[in-house]
Amino acid sequence: MNTQYKFSESNLNVLMTILLGIFFIFMVFARIDTYLKNQAVHDCAKTSIYTKIDAETKQQLVYPALDVYKNCLKDKGIK
């Protein structure tokens, strides 16, 4: 039995619309994932600082607490 599939122009338009929709949804989820990862890194950086006031100069010195930062990233599943 020789079966031939014939696609009309409307069928191709529907197929292209579906494929573009799937691609768009994939791109949105990829952007959301990147945004959430960046937010997690930012939050860890914000919470893992050590602040000290220099007695002589009265200036505020901010140091990163690397061990706290690395543990925070590990807890959030990054790196």
Image (tube, grey):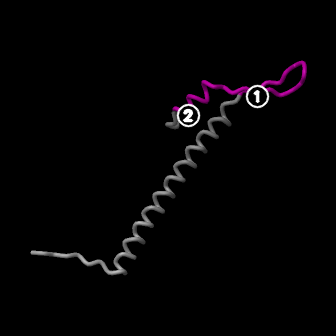
Give the residue type at disc 1.
Answer: Val
The range drawn in magenta is 50-74
Viewer-side residue, 54 vs 30 = 30
Instruction: Measure how far apart labels 2 and 1 are at the Cα level.
Output: 20 Å
58 inside magenta stretch: yes
Number of numbered markers: 2
Image quadrant holding the N terminus, namely bottom left
Could you tell me residue 50's position as x and y percent? 72, 27
Label 1, secondary structure: give it: strand
- Residue 4 has which mark? none
Residue at 61% from the left image edge and 30% from the top image edge:
69
Label 1 CA crowd tier, 10 Å (few <14, some 14–19, many 20+): few
Residue at 65% from the left image edge and 35% from the top image edge:
45
Question: Is 27 situated left or right of 42 in this image?
Answer: left
Residue behind mark 1: 62
Residue behind mark 2: 73
70 inside magenta stretch: yes
Question: Is 33 situated left or right of 11 in this image?
Answer: right
Viewer-side residue, 31 vs 59 = 31
Mark with earlier residue (2, 1): 1
Give the residue type at disc 2.
Answer: Leu
Q: Is 49 placed above or below 18 here? A: above
Question: Is 57 situated left or right of 48 in this image?
Answer: right
Judged from this view, the residue extending furthest toward the right is 57
Label 2, secondary structure: give it: helix
Could you tell me residue 35's position as x and y percent? 58, 49
